[in-house]
Amino acid sequence: MDGMDQTVNPVPEEEAAGKKKKKEKVKRSVGAEILSWILTLVGALAIALVIRGVIFEPVRVDGDSMLDTLQNKEIMLVSKYDYSSIWLCLPWQSDNASQQAPRITYGNPNLLDVVICRYPARGAVNFVKRVCGMPGDTVELREGYLYLNGEQVQEEKDLINSAYRVNAMSNGETFGPYRVPKRGDTLTVSGSGEKLQFQLDGELWDRKKTCIIAKDETGKQLKVYTKKTDDSARNGRQESEMTVLSWDGKNYTSKDWSEIIPSLSGKTFTVDEDYYFLMGDHRMNSNDGRSVGAVERSMIIGHVRRVVFPFGSWRGVK
């Protein structure tokens, strides 16, 4: 059956040689291979840093200040995408230097959120606390219960173990009233000797060691903060504290106030950022806003969402 015969045409030598070349693996030099690995590792590290900085980060609880909400040594998943504060610093900078680096904030915490924060002059040390006062609020503790602007916060009653409501850190079960600064508030300073007086929006204000930052109409910065000092020579290695005025980049302690107070007194400064008042749920065992004052918005760096370890304790945090 001639019509059924099949013929096979030979492949031209040039075409066969081309196909063979395509199948051959291109060999890279050792240097190119090393560069490829370096670029891969750098890319993976960059992605990990972005995830850690703006999406989520695991953080371990250290201490009992948030009992019974959080237990010592538990690992929390902290989200960054709803609100955060990103320090634009380099990995090899010291903790205190990194805290002075430029920061970017987005979003804002809500009342009673559990957050990760930092304290002024404590570098990159993380603290976990609950938001108990929003910018502009007046905060009080009455018999261990939270009041804002004269009204009891009902939701807070179900979050705190009543056994932890006695506040041994500030005169039994009471605190306040304390006004939380907010962006745009006016601040004036006056005083003499080792005593300073502050007015916030025209009313006498108890700073409660809040590190307050404000600017005058020309943009010069006034910063008032509390600094720990070592009085070992006088008090047998006991720590004490002093208030420092930082004006236009120069620091003034109490012995220098006579130089600066006359020129600052009566001058109006504008608060540069919103502040938040934070407390631990274990009110008898927490270093928080009652002892360090309210913190700037940029000091709040994450929102605690879940406990992820131990696995048997997996749960949401509220």
Image (cartoon, rainbow, N blue to C red):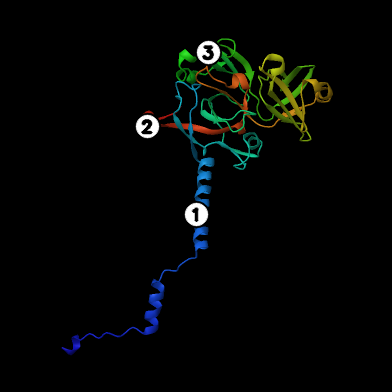
Q: Mark 1 near mark 3, Cβ–Cβ under 8 Å?
A: no
Q: Nearer the viewer, mark 2 or mark 1?
A: 1
Q: x, y (%) of residue 294?
A: 62, 24
Q: At x 72% / y 21%, what residue is drawn?
A: 243
What secondary structure is marked by label 2?
helix
Q: Nearer the viewer, mark 3 or mark 2?
A: 2
Q: At x 48% / y 15%, what residue is drawn?
A: 164
Work out which residue is located at the far left of the displayed protein and give it: 1
Kind of residue sitting beneath label 3:
Gly
Compared across the picture, whether 169 is left or right of 23 comes to right
Compute the Cα span from label 3 to label 2. 33 Å
Q: At x 83% / y 25%, what residue is drawn?
A: 263
10 Å crowding of disc 1: few (<14), some (14-19), many (20+): few
Please give the label number shown on residue 311. Answer: 2
Query: Which residue was labeled with disc 3?
Result: 144
Kind of residue sitting beneath label 1:
Thr
Q: Nearer the viewer, mark 1 or mark 3?
A: 1
Q: x, y (%) of residue 174?
A: 57, 11
Query: Which residue was labeled with disc 1?
Result: 40
What secondary structure is marked by label 1?
helix
Kind of residue sitting beneath label 2:
Phe
